[in-house]
Image: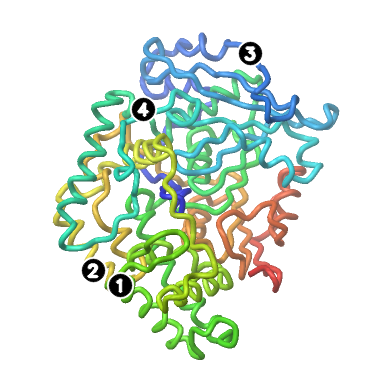
Amino acid sequence: MRNTRTASLLAVGAAVALATTPTPATAFAAAGAPATDPLRPYTQQKLDWGHCDAETPAAFRCATLQVPLDYGDPGGKKLGIAVSRLPAGRAEERRGVLLFNPGGPGAPGLGLPAAMESYLPREVKNQYDLVGFDPRGVGRSSPLSCGLTPDELDIDRPYAAGTFAKDVRWARTVADKCAAAEGDTLRHITTRDTARDMDLLRAVMGERRISYYGGSYGTYLGAVYLQMFPRRADRFVLDSAVDPTRYGRGTFQEMAEATEPAFTRWSRWTAGQDARYHLGTTPAGVRAAFWDIVARADREPLATAEGLRTGDDIRSARDVFFKERRAAEWVAGLKKAAEGAGPTTPAPDPELPPENEVVGLWAVLCGDTSASWPRVPERYRRDAVRDKARYPLYGDFASTVKPCAFWKPAAEAPTTVGNDVDALILQNEWDPQTPLTAARQMHRSLRGSRMVTVLGGEGHGVYGAGSCADEPATVYLTTGRLPEKDVVCRAPADSR
């Protein structure tokens, strides 16, 4: 979801799964089309691989995959999907392709193979072509645009009685602008259609099966692919997993719920560091110091090196509390600012993302789950008041009105995730975007999966960070062997 702090919102949720489908064409047939292959013009296309740009290695090549906007009408409008590839390091060891998705929804993935290359072990790079893509409607893949203003890009909106009517107008305006600008296209910017694009790419690249690494929302996309095309899935790594049963409004709300124990943990740790941070010698004292800063900023915004910050601005940076040392340094800096000395540590980045990423977020998230969002604004008011009391840091942000309340439904219902296909789930204990509870639910939904939990692990994204999760992930990708049972291991003591 996105302001930069909620950047990779993630997930997608539930509903009607198609039968096992070996190709995009049969997926189309399963939905009621003739038994002939209406996708043959797409599956027989040849990708014209060329140099991506001047800043990437010569071996990193890009091409454009043509896909139907509507897989129910493959003779209609087409979209161009930007794809990229780094070839396997050793042709004699090559197993196939490892497809990447970074999350979002709305995040581009074209550059991921080049970005991930330095983090991946050589044995993985030897076996796989690393393949990235910008999902439909995002980045270079027929990008969406709704003409949103800078204020309309800001998705982190606290509830306040005096501004709620304005926030309802914002949510309705975003939905109306996108409907006017993109029309029927929005009905097909969905997780299911992106999964079909992935399978079409598999067919065009001549692969019988694909392997996959998805992070954040990309775990949901991967789970939907596993549900729609289980026989075409090889080795799937789902890093920092979304709860497929709560995808949509529940994704925001899970973030609020998970922030409170992180805040409590932080206050305990910081109470033991009072000589350094001067925020209190007890957890209660540390929490009181923080809320005093918020109250001061509510009365008069704090002048910081990053500009004026209100109490709501401070609360919206709730993800900082998932990293104890960073949060202590930041709050200590805010305390100095409140005392007139100015902060010593930069606050979490408050910049807004590009418009296309915000539009991509709403298009996928709202389209996939529009039927589950209340249509009556008063419901959001009541929920925001309730959840601000339950989860003071972020509860009202999570539960107040969003453009999804006014979004038109997608062309089909979302996918219910539940199967026995193999997958490996990686999860940090203290993840600000996809909490541990979400990953556990993904694990329950994917009954054939194994899960690696990094106790004490902080941050969003696990593989390649040097934790105890790296080895089982590498073994799985290179041999296909899942751990015999779920793995619970500890982060290094100095990883804060």
Q: Quadrant of residue 289?
A: bottom left
Residue 299 pos. (x, y %): 27, 73
Instruction: State the residue position of label 2.
Output: 386
Q: Disc 3 or 1, which lies upstream in sequence?
A: 3
Contact flag, marks 3 and 1 (Cβ < 8 Å): no
Q: Amino acid at mark 2?
A: Arg
C-alpha span from label 3 to label 1: 54 Å
Mark 2: few, some, or many residues within 10 Å (few <14, many ≥20)? some
Q: Amino acid at mark 3?
A: Asp
What secondary structure is marked by label 3? Answer: loop
Residue 203 pos. (x, y %): 59, 21
Q: Amino acid at mark 4?
A: His
Q: Disc 3 or 2, which lies upstream in sequence?
A: 3
Foreground mark, 4 or 1? 1
Residue 54 got which mark? none
Residue 390 got which mark? 1
Q: Disc 4 or 3, which lies upstream in sequence?
A: 3
Instruction: State the residue position of label 4.
Output: 188
What secondary structure is marked by label 1? Answer: helix
Instruction: State the residue position of label 3.
Output: 48
Mark 4: few, some, or many residues within 10 Å (few <14, many ≥20)? many
What secondary structure is marked by label 4? Answer: helix
Residue 225 pos. (x, y %): 51, 36
C-alpha span from label 3 to label 2: 55 Å
Contact flag, marks 4 and 3 (Cβ < 8 Å): no
Contact flag, marks 1 and 2 (Cβ < 8 Å): yes
Which residue is found at the position 32% from the left and 76% from the top?
Answer: 296
C-alpha span from label 1 to label 2: 6 Å
Contact flag, marks 3 and 2 (Cβ < 8 Å): no
Foreground mark, 2 or 4? 2
Residue 410 visible in the picture: yes
How many badges with numbers are in the image?
A: 4
